[in-house]
Amino acid sequence: MQKTDVLIVDYGSTFHGTALKTDDGIVCVVPRQLQPADEDGNALKELVEGLGGRCGQCAGCPLGSLP
């Protein structure tokens, strides 16, 4: 199960994001500076999809604008 709320935090420019599976679903922490077609953005999108999620479902998430 994937939640559809996004949590955007600022851990500084060196933070590239993370996603992990919990008992209730997937938690994805996305940095505000993530850009479409960015190498880090694509890697995080692959991580979410590898956990069974579908990027683009969470309103306001930068990953939703990635191709």
Image (cartoon, helix red, strand yellow):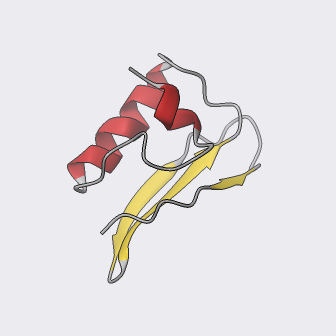
50 vs 12, nearest the viewer: 50
Q: Residue at x 22, y 48 (%)?
A: 50
| The N terminus, quarter of image | bottom left
Q: Is residue 8 left or right of residue 67?
A: right
Question: Residue drawn at (54%, 46%), measured in percent from left and top?
Answer: 17
* Residue at point 34%, 48% (across, down): 48
Residue 60 lies, in percent from the top left, at 63, 43
Q: Residue at (58%, 35%) from the top-left corner?
A: 62
Q: Is residue 37 left or right of residue 11?
A: left
Say whether residue 59 is left or right of residue 32: left
- Where on the picture, by quarter, is residue 31? top right
Q: Nearer the viewer, residue 10 or 25?
A: 25
Image coordinates for residue 36, horizontal then vertical, percent: 53, 20
**Percent x, y for residue 26?**
38, 65
Query: What quarter of the picture does the C terminus occupy?
Result: top left
Closest to the observer: 9 or 5? 5
Q: Residue 43 location, x and y as percent?
A: 38, 33
The part of the image, by quadrant, that contains residue 32 is top right
Q: Compared to 32, does 35 lie above or below?
A: above
* Residue 42 in which image quadrant: top left
